[in-house]
């Protein structure tokens, strides 16, 4: 696989799996307005994933379509971060996961907008409008339920304690990142990390939340190693196209 | 939905479909404060390109005519056709009127 294809898949798979997780929540939100809002975000990510997967398929030029890439890969061929695989444990987990990911998207897509690859740059610019809104929304929820009641605060802190260990791999730099950055296609992750940390700390302070002391971080997503959640996600996501390979809308 | 639901107060949503056009009432929603109300309005009412402008107003801030006052408010206009500017002849060829 060409390096650029794998690089695009890392971005695409984040959006695809995030979209799937949020879609699972459709009709389960605490009230109607929030249900529509979360489903909207899920659809934004599905749109981003579709554009990126189609572009990956085009660069791959092996005859696979964007749909093939979405539905016909094995688990180890997905390169999303493990943060987006984490389950919809409760509303606090959903919002903390969302905020950490929105913040990451905000910084990384802002950088990707300057990619020498014009398609990636254009997709980044388009996605950023959506990402700006996602971040505004999840930031407001962080502060709202971070304070809120004793129970809401406890749940939020517990979600932070669970999810924080999945933020390390977001900024891991490997040979592929270095190669893409050298070609000015990819972004400089350490710079994005600095901005991300600053933004996250600011909001955590406003939301009265603590970053866990333990420095333990999970790794592997970008190399195709996933948490046990991923198998269940793919089983559900791929069931139909695998059972009915010729199914069309 | 019932009175025990803790979904926050009710807000009325108004949408402007094009720049310059008046805002029209679109519906209502629940939210705990202004920031959340405008976000919810965006997500509930403008997902399909319905608008370019959006207002939310707390429902309890809207003053409306009580049904018992409706006759006094509206019926007197029934027989005042002379309030319509239709009782003169338009000059032929007049434009921009």
Image (tube, coloured by chain):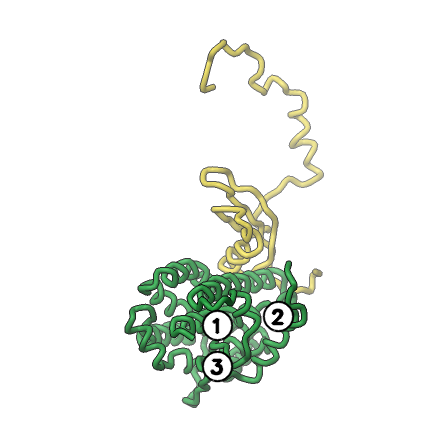
Give the drawing colour for chain A: green
Q: Is residue A220 above or below residue B60?
A: below
- Taking the image as shown, residue A8 lies to the left or right of residue A16, namely left
Instruction: Decide which of tag 3 and tag 1 comes sooner along the chain.
Output: 1
User: Marks 3 and 1: which is nearer the front?
Assistant: 3
Return the mark for residue A64: none
Q: Which mark is residue A24?
A: 2
Give the image location of residue A245, x and y in percent: 64, 68
The tag on residue A224 is: 3
Q: Which residue is mark 1?
A: A14
* N-terminal label among 3 and 2: 2
Q: Is residue A243 above or below residue B26?
A: below
Q: Position of residue A201 (x, y in %)?
A: 38, 76
In the picture, the quarter occupied by the N terminus of chain A is bottom left
Estimate the x, y position of residue A246 in percent, counting from the top left.
64, 64
Dot in front, 1 or 2 = 1
Q: At 51% across and 58% down in the image, what residue appears? A: B39
Q: Residue at x 60, y 55 (%)?
A: B29
């Amino acid at each position: 696989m060409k390096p650029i294809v794998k690089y695009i898949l890392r971005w695409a798979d984040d959006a695809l799996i995030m979209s799937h997780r949020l879609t699972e929540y459709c009709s389960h939100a605490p009230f109607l307005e929030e249900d529509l809002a979360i489903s909207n975000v899920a659809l934004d990510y599905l749109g981003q994933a579709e554009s990126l997967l189609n572009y990956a398929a085009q660069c791959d030029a092996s005859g696979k379509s964007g749909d093939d890439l979405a539905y016909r890969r094995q688990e180890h061929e997905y390169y999303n971060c493990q943060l987006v695989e984490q389950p919809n444990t409760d509303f606090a987990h959903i919002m903390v996961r969302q905020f950490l990911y929105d913040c990451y998207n905000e910084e990384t897509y802002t950088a990707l907008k300057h990619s020498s690859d014009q398609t990636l740059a254009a997709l980044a610019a388009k996605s950023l409008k959506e990402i700006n809104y996602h971040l505004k929304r999840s930031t407001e929820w962080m502060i709202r339920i971070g304070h809120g009641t004793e129970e809401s605060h406890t749940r939020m802190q517990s979600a932070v304690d669970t999810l924080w260990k999945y933020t390390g791999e977001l900024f891991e730099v490997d040979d592929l990142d270095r190669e893409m950055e050298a070609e000015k296609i990819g972004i400089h992750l350490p710079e994005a990390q600095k901005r991300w940390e600053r933004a996250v700390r600011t909001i955590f302070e406003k939301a009265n939340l603590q970053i866990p002391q333990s420095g333990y971080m999970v790794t592997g997503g970008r190399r195709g190693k996933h948490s046990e959640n991923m198998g269940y996600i793919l089983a559900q996501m791929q069931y139909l196209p695998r059972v009915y390979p010729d199914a069309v809308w | 939905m019932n009175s025990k639901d803790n979904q926050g107060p009710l807000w009325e949503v108004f949408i402007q479909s094009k720049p310059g056009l008046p805002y029209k009432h679109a519906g209502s929603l629940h939210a705990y404060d202004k920031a959340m109300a405008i976000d919810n309005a965006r997500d509930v009412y403008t997902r399909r390109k319905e608008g370019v402008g959006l207002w939310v107003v707390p429902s309890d801030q809207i003053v409306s005519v009580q049904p018992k006052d409706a006759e006094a408010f509206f019926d007197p206009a029934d027989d005042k056709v002379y309030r319509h500017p239709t009782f003169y002849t338009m000059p032929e060829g007049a434009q921009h009127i």
